[in-house]
Amino acid sequence: MQEIWYIFKDDKLLLCRSSEPRLLTSCDVGALSGLLINKGTVVIGDRDKGKVINEFWGEMAHNAAVPGNMITMGLREVGSTFGEEVFYKAARAFQLMKWYGHHLFCMSCGGRLKPSPFDNGKICPSCGAIFYPPVTPAIIVAVEREGKILLARNANFPPGRYSVIAGFVEPGESFEDAVRREVKEEVSVEVKNIRYFGSQPWPFPHTIMVGFTAQWASGEIKPDGREILDARWFAPDELPDIPSGISISRKLIDHFRQYNI
Ligand SMILES: [Zn+2]
């Protein structure tokens, strides 16, 4: 099986420059020897059980020059260029790279951690503590009212961009609690009929987006003015600028449009 190397420089994925950009294989990485500050394997599940490991991650030094036969590409563009499957694999490698590079010491005793021989974790040789790459859940929800969808303008969005409501799950909350709280906090609306839609790993930096649909129950939109600058009900044929590409936010909006036009 061909080995694939997901090597990043300044958070962008290195690709071979050919007529069509392509992922790096073991044949390509020789040119990068001495330029990587970190590298490792991508382990899915347990490392033992006779598994063949054929995916690797690497981090290129910040000041190293990208070889002439290679280019770099941001992860979102990787998704729109190569599709979801490659995006998820590159995203997993990216998250491992970030965590391995930054989580160096034991949070219990301060000892220097070593990679686990069994999986993607790290073990402290001094006290035996085990650590795993973090995955942070966030909810994202399309709220519908009489054939219109609730879209909001986040303060961090590009000008004119609207999307569905999203936010991190807090300790002690169910996903449904988080949906109710986030919608209430951000636009002062109560929702009902919360239904699971789907999920998506989102590596910026280590989130799992858990998507829902819901229906308006009560209240009029009042943006919080801090995180959300504007929010409105939009009919399917009058949508504003919305996220593009493979994001679950776009899938939720497309799903609404499909069933309301
Ligand atoms: Zn320790």
Image: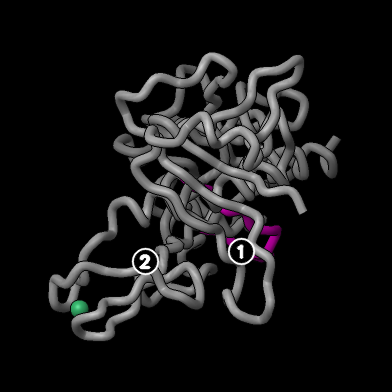
Mark 2, Cα crowd under 10 Å, few <14 / some 14-19 / many 20+, is some
Answer yes or no: is residue 164 visible: yes
Residue for badge 1: 192
The one of 134 and 178 positioned closer to us in this rendering:
134
The one of 41 and 176 positioned closer to us in this rendering:
41
What range of the chain is rendered magenta? Answer: 190-203
Tell me the element at label 2. loop
Q: Of the numbered discs in the image, which one, if any, rests on residue 170?
A: 2
Tag 1 or tag 2, which sits nearer the N-term? Answer: 2
Q: Position of residue 44 (x, y in %)?
A: 61, 67
The one of 9 and 235 positioned closer to us in this rendering:
9
The one of 49 and 177 positioned closer to us in this rendering:
49
Q: Position of residue 151 (x, y in %)?
A: 57, 36
The amino acid type, in three-letter code, at marker 1 is Lys
Quadrant in the rendering for residue 209? bottom right
Magenta region, main secondary structure: strand
Instruction: Name the residue at 56% across, 42% down.
Output: 6
Quarter of the image with the C terminus in it: top right
Tag nearer the camera, 2 or 1 = 2
Q: Position of residue 42 (x, y in %)?
A: 55, 58
Mark 1, Cα crowd under 10 Å, few <14 / some 14-19 / many 20+, is some
Instruction: Name the residue at 57% across, 74% down.
Output: 47
Quadrant in the rendering for residue 10? top left
The amino acid type, in three-letter code, at marker 2 is Glu
